[in-house]
Image (tube, grey):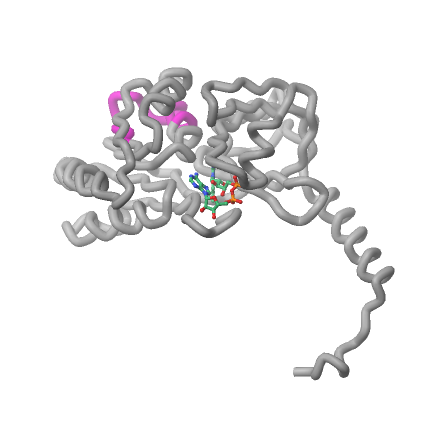
Amino acid sequence: MNEPSQQPQISESSQAQQGRVTRMLLQWLMRSARVAAVETLSPHFQLIELQGEALRGVAWTAGQKIQVAMGAGLSARTYTPMSWDAGKGRTRLLAFSHGDGPGSRWASGLRDGDTCQFFGPRRSLELAGLVAPVVLFGDETSFGLAASLRQTLRASDTLHMFEATDVAESRQVLDAVSLGEARLIARSADDAHLATVEAELLRLAANGAQFVLIGKASSIQRISRALKAASVASSRIKAKAYWAPGKSGLD
Ligand SMILES: Cc1cc2nc3c(=O)[nH]c(=O)nc-3n(C[C@H](O)[C@H](O)[C@H](O)COP(=O)(O)OP(=O)(O)OC[C@H]3O[C@@H](n4cnc5c(N)ncnc54)[C@H](O)[C@@H]3O)c2cc1C
């Protein structure tokens, strides 16, 4: 490796130019959309409809992700389309603004008519071939994905179970997106609530269910481990961490 003094020197103007070129390339690769509607379903949840020419004719399947650019830089935050109307060039996202990260600020500050850029849709969780009965375990970040599966799986074929920080608020949001029958379990500080989740999921495993696990990384790992220990084949478990404490923009 070169010593610092031997490394090629890049002038500030050349760095700025590289930054401009990178941004131009990204603009070219990203889709532009306008916020056609944004509905605040509760203090922490926004239902966002994006629309644009670049969204027309796009092939999308439930479980895919988009990565929304945050400001003019290179950072992005990931969201899951709830639906995609390729004819009209429209997609809908359900964003949970947990706190003060760029994604939370973006979602909670959006107004009709704002514009945004994003990558995707791209592969994330491969859900083709999912066969009923399905058990979906997640959290506030997974409501959008659960709603998107409604188009392919009947309500009677799927059991939804979510851990949530504010159960009353989450109930209100789930009702608004036609997932009112979902089970909600209040998070406890020491994750003791996961024992209840585990017990219930193991009971359902006996019925031959397939499992979709999404949301907080440590919860998914724990549930996935418990299912495998109970001899549930890996092929019956589809898992994807959406966030982890202390990690920004996990993906
Ligand atoms: C494939 C994929 C699809 C996703 N789809 C959705 C979606 O449809 N809707 C949605 O709301 N989110 C979704 N997420 C999750 C979302 O991208 C993250 O929660 C993201 O971290 C939010 O960005 P932020 O800038 O607000 O926080 P960040 O700056 O990324 O994170 C700052 C800190 O906040 C904490 N944090 C992050 N997320 C959460 C959370 N949910 N709850 C509590 N604390 C948190 C962590 O400690 C983190 O270190 C998805 C993630 C992935 C990987």
Residue at the far right: name it. Answer: 13
Q: Nearer the viewer, residue 237 or 244?
A: 244
Q: Is residue 203 above or below residue 5?
A: above
Span shown in magenta: 147-161
Q: Residue at image x 75%, y 53%?
A: 22
**Number of numbered markers:** 0
Residue for point 36% across, 24% down:
170
Q: Position of residue 60 (x, y in %)?
A: 52, 33
From the viewer's perspective, is residue 211 above or below residue 230? Answer: above
Question: Which picture quadrant has residue 104?
Answer: top right
Q: Is residue 201 visible?
A: yes
Percent x, y for residue 128? 39, 38
Closest to the observer, 217 or 234: 217
Magenta run includes residue 51: no
Please give the name of the residue rendered at 28% of the width and 45% of the height, measured from the top-left corner.
Answer: 237
Can residue 158 be seen?
no
* Residue beneath the point at 58% across and 20% down: 38
Which corner quadrant holds the N terminus?
bottom right
The location of residue 207, given as percent across then percent down, is: 14, 36
Q: Say left or right for 228 vs 17.
A: left
Closer to the camera in the image, 228 or 172: 172
Image x and y of residue 140, in percent: 39, 32
Residue 78 lies left or right of residue 15; in this view the side is left
